[in-house]
Amino acid sequence: MKREANYRPELGRTGVMRACLDVLEVYRVWHQRMNSGAVKLQSESGKSRMFRAARKGTADILATPFPRRTHPAILWIECKSSDGKQRPAQSEFEKEVVLAGHEYIVVNDAQQLIDWLKQKGVTR
């Protein structure tokens, strides 16, 4: 199969997230993968309860880049597949953190994160 020079394979959400984590490593930006899933815990007595690591809608990655070498920005990164859309809880989370002065981006390609970092003056 012949490919065009600018061919880039489609990445699913997990691939986009892994690529963004790699970009943050290259740019030496502190970051944390935010797991917002729930798990059922069972005690020795047999009782069980649900534990949620973060609330519904929390972005996939929290990062603190230093734009133009000043104070760190608080950046929330929501990773989506090429056709992925924000869920209502994610949109609410975005509104809340932006209102608090944080940065929030939705990416379906790691290049969008690279472009954001460059636009803000974050260097490697």
Image (cartoon, rainbow, N blue to C red):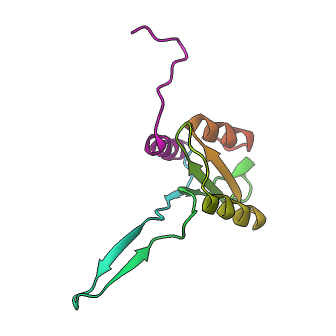
Residue 105: image location, x then y, percent:
66, 49
Residue 5: image location, x then y, percent:
53, 12
Residue 10 colored in magenta in the image: yes
Q: In this view, does 41 lie above or below 1?
A: below
- Residue at image x 73%, y 62%? 95
Magenta-tinted stretch: 1-26
In the rendered image, the quadrant that contains the C terminus is top right
Residue 120 colored in magenta in the image: no
- Numbered label tally: 0
Q: Quadrant of residue 56?
A: bottom right
Residue 23: image location, x then y, percent:
53, 41
Residue 123: image location, x then y, percent:
65, 41
Q: Quadrant of residue 100?
A: bottom right
Indicate left or right for 83 with 123 as reference.
left
In the rendered image, the quadrant that contains the N terminus is top left
Camera-side residue: 117 or 107? 107
